Image (cartoon, grey):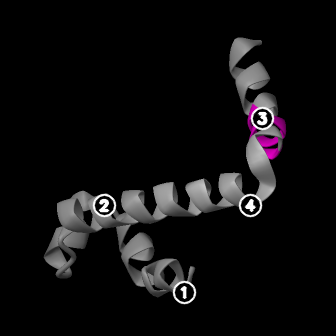
Amino acid sequence: MPLAFLQSKTLNSFSLGDSISTRIGTKVQSERIKLFFFAVVLSCASVTLTGGVGFVVLFSPHLTRRLV
């Protein structure tokens, strides 16, 4: 979790767009892959801790919103 918080400057630079992020020195592709990996690890950890039922409860509102 602390590693994800350390990436906050990278996330802020992504809000400026890829070209500006590259100009200010961010390696966009590698940082994007790294942040995706962090997101996957954090979601796996939350599913492991709360169980499959918790994941379904958290996911179902988003799924129904797309279906409607």
Q: Position of residue 8 (x, y in %)?
A: 48, 80
Q: Secondary structure at mark 4?
A: helix
Type of the residue with mark 2? Arg
- Which numbered disc, 3 or 2, marks the residue closer to the eye? 3
Q: Nearer the viewer, residue 34 or 12?
A: 34
Give the extent of the magenta segment: 54-59
Residue 7 in which image quadrant: bottom left
Give the mark nearer the N terminus: 4 vs 1.
Answer: 1
- The quadrant in which residue 56 appears is top right
Is disc 3 surrounded by few (<14), some (14 to 19) or many (20+) residues within 10 Å? Answer: few
Residue designated by label 3: 56
Residue 10 % position (x, y): 37, 76
Dot 2: element: helix
Mark 4 or mark 2, earlier in chain: 2
Closest to the observer, 23 or 1: 1
| Quarter containing the C terminus | top right
Q: CA distance from mark 1 to mark 2?
A: 17 Å
Does 43 appear in magenta? no
Instruction: Quote the CA–CA distance across marks 3 and 2.
Output: 27 Å
Name the residue type under label 4: Leu
Residue 62 sits above or below residue 4 on the image: above
Q: Amino acid at mark 3?
A: Val
For discs 3 and 4, the disc positioned in front in the rendered view: 4
At label 4, counting other C-alpha atoms closer than 10 Å, the crowd grade (few under 14, some 14-19, many 20 or more) is: few
- Residue 38 spot, x, y in % from top left: 45, 65
* Residue 9, placed above or below residue 57: below
Question: Label 3, label 4: how many angstroms apart (C-alpha)?
Answer: 13 Å
| Disc with the residue nearer the chain's start (3 vs 2) | 2
Which dot, 1 or 2, sits closer to the camera?
1
**C-alpha separation, residue under disc 4 versus residue under disc 1:** 18 Å
> Which mark, by number, is residue 32?
2
Instruction: Give the CA distance from mark 3 to mark 1.
Output: 26 Å
